[in-house]
Image (tube, grey):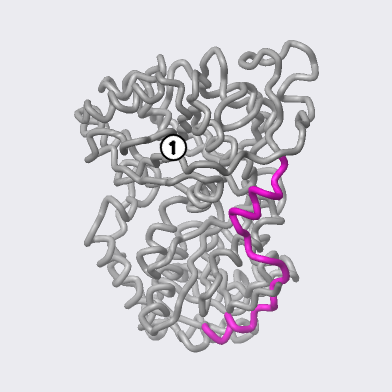
Amino acid sequence: MVTSVPRLVIAAPSSGSGKTTVATGLMAALTARGLAVSPHKVGPDYIDPGYHALATGRVGRNLDAYLCGPELVGPLFAHGARGCDIAVVEGVMGLYDGAAGEGELASTAQVAKLLRAPVVLVVDASSQSRSVAALVHGFASFDPEVRIGGVILNKVGSDRHEALLREALDSVGVPVLGVLRRAAPVETPSRHLGLVPVAERGALAVEAVAAMAAQVAGGCDLAALVALARSAGPLAGAGWDAGEALVSSPPPPPPFPSPGALPPDSRSALDGPRPQAPDGLVDAGRPVRVAVAGGAAFTFSYSEHAELLTAAGAEVVVFDPLRDEELPEGTAGLVVGGGFPEVYASELSANEGLRKSVAELALSGAPVAAECAGLLYLCRDLDGLPMCGVLDASARMSERLTLGYRDAVAVSDSALAGAGTRMRGHEFHRTVVEPGAGSAPAWGMRAPERRVEGFVERGVHASYLHTHWASEPGVARRFVERCRTS
């Protein structure tokens, strides 16, 4: 199968250059002209895809070569872009910035090459004129396999400033596809972990996206951008499919004889190979109901997770811990992803009915998968306010930002992963949980530092680590199987 959806990658020399404004505005402007636009984001970002979804009316999807491996970037892109007229991919950080110490891995440049997509470089021109030519020339020539198809100049001060910039860029041979003037910034407020998510802003987020669309439509050559997108080369390979991924994924490894603490010998969970298990798939019998936390407090999730759960035989039901006083009737398993429980700690704590419902489910042995915000919610308390009390641990806000990719291995057999399962993940939080690991830790971190982290208790798997299940579809299959048998 060949994917021929026209596509662009919106990149920049560095963070703060205006990528999100241009990418989101372009998505909205093209959607307003009747095109079906497929939105994508490079990296593990959960917030920008929310704005992308608002701009296009379609699910915003992530393309992360570290979490999922380079081999899944094309299939996941084709899955999201199926049936669309054009795709816009927003980059991460600077064009050539990726996973620390890993070369080009997980960079916008790598994703652009994997997608055979032209790059539009967004340049903050506010403090330069002729130097812009050296900057663009450097980015265009650094990697010959990356095609810089055009430049959008951001924060241009005047007609004279624009003329100087255009004259300088004439010598580089990279066309100027847009000029955005210095203006009052679009209202996209930030806090300790970045932009405030769409789910928390309501009508204000709609207004922000409309303002971005107006900026891009007024300052960019949309026809030229579409033409550039159509110059992308064909992309070979079939689109990712949750059902097919479950069938083709290897079965989960068997548990170690004594799950929990790291084995004392040198062939520990951190060093040894992944154990092998007999072939076999779960029984796709009766559907089981899996409740997934949503709403303003829990906005961090990858859409592929729900798709994999559904393909494995689950009925996925989203509930809002800020509003719903109990779990959905018939809940057999619970998934609580990331978000901002620290912002809503008072409201979450005040919802005693739901906290009790979650605790009862967890104590029954039902499967519970919690990531980051979900971990905090399951703790005894958060900043002194009572939470669900599933874990004998306390959470609090911290001044220190914990951020980065992680290479991890499951060290305890759980409802989510068998001991020995290797996954790559991402941490992103300004909180601390004490203790940081239970008697049966969830993960052993192999890189960048060796440590154990998280909790495995009864059917609960709780950890700070954000993972992308498309890289290891067996975790969804295993989770649903445990929902059937617990």
Q: Residue at x 53, y 75 (%)?
A: 83
What type is the residue that disc 1 sits on? Val
Q: Residue at x 50, y 59 (%)?
A: 61
Q: Position of residue 364 (x, y in %)?
A: 41, 20
The quarter holding residue 338 reads top left
Closer to us: 118 or 457: 457
Residue with the mark numbered 1: 335
Q: Position of residue 135 (x, y in %)?
A: 60, 69
Residue 237 appears in the figure: yes
Q: Residue at x 24, y 57 (%)?
A: 202
Left or right of 251 in this view: 333: left
Q: How many marks?
A: 1
Confirm whether the magenta stretch covers residue 241: yes
Q: Residue at x 39, y 48 (%)?
A: 194
Closer to us: 303 or 16: 303
Reply above or below: 86 against 258.
below
Reply above or below: 444 against 438.
below
| Magenta residues, start to end | 226-250
Left or right of 99 in this view: 429: left
The quarter holding residue 277 reads top right
Q: Position of residue 311 (x, y in %)?
A: 55, 50
Q: Quadrant of the N terminus?
A: bottom right
Give SS at disc 1.
strand
- Residue at the extreme front: 285
Q: Position of residue 281 (x, y in %)?
A: 67, 41
Residue 405 appears in the figure: no
Q: Residues within 10 Å of mark 1 (few under 14, many from 20)?
A: many
Reply above or below: 263 against 111.
above
